[in-house]
Image: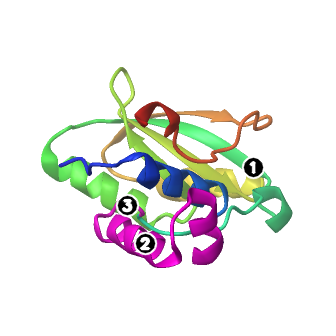
Amino acid sequence: MEQTRLDRTDLAILGELQREGRLSNADLAERVKLSPSACLRRVQRLEQAGVLAGYAALIDPAKVGLGLQAFVRVQLARHEPDAVATFTARVNRWDEVVACHALTGEMDYLLHVVVQDLEHFSRFLLDHLLNASGVADVNSSFVLRTVKPPRGLPLGHLA
């Protein structure tokens, strides 16, 4: 994958949008010291290049009834392309999985699972994950509290 070249102004735009994605173009332009038209052109270029992959609201899971989060490590029984493709297709259909990462080491995947409660997690585990063919081992850890929530990428070192 080719890396997009970014200058200091691009990085400033990205930083501002990470902090406050609902900024108007006029406010964004003022913060990064550009004219509104120049700022809009840069934002559109960043969108077209896929650097700005989308805009989303940060929702507090507990306030919408999703009070339990778990990190689930999964080891597959087989690693042939068809087994991996089948597993990843399933993961992408499970709403409870908000992120999935392929790993090095003993376990193959790390799933971030967000559910209502322990009963919901148990149903997810039994009905989906443990029922999925090709899964050899599953290990879960529950989130006690979030010390640092995700807030964006560390762009400061790129300038």
Mark drawn on residue 38: 2
Q: Residue at x 41, y 42 (%)?
A: 101
CA distance separating discs 2 and 3: 43 Å
Q: Residue at x 47, y 70 (%)?
A: 39
Please indicate, yes or no, whether residue 148 appears anywhere in the rendered image: yes
CA distance separating discs 2 and 1: 44 Å
The boundaries of the magenta stretch are 24-52
Quick check: is 47 in the magenta stretch?
yes
Mark drawn on residue 90: 3
- The disc, 2 or 1, on the residue closer to the chain's N-terminal end is 2
Labels in figure, total: 3
- Residue 147 vs residue 81, the one in the foreground: 147
Quick check: is 31 in the magenta stretch?
yes
Q: Quadrant of residue 21?
A: bottom right
Q: Can you say which quadrant of the picture contains the C terminus?
A: top left
Type of the residue with mark 3: Arg
Of tags 2 and 1, the one toward the viewer is 2
Type of the residue with mark 2: Ala
Q: Is the residue 59 above or below the residue 19 in the image?
A: below
Q: Regarding mark 3 in the picture, which secondary structure is present there?
A: helix
Which residue is denoted by mark 1 in the rendering? 68
* Residue 70 percent across, percent down from the top left: 65, 42
- The disc, 1 or 3, on the residue closer to the chain's N-terminal end is 1
How is the structure coloured here? rainbow
Q: Is the residue 63 above or below the residue 78 in the image?
A: below
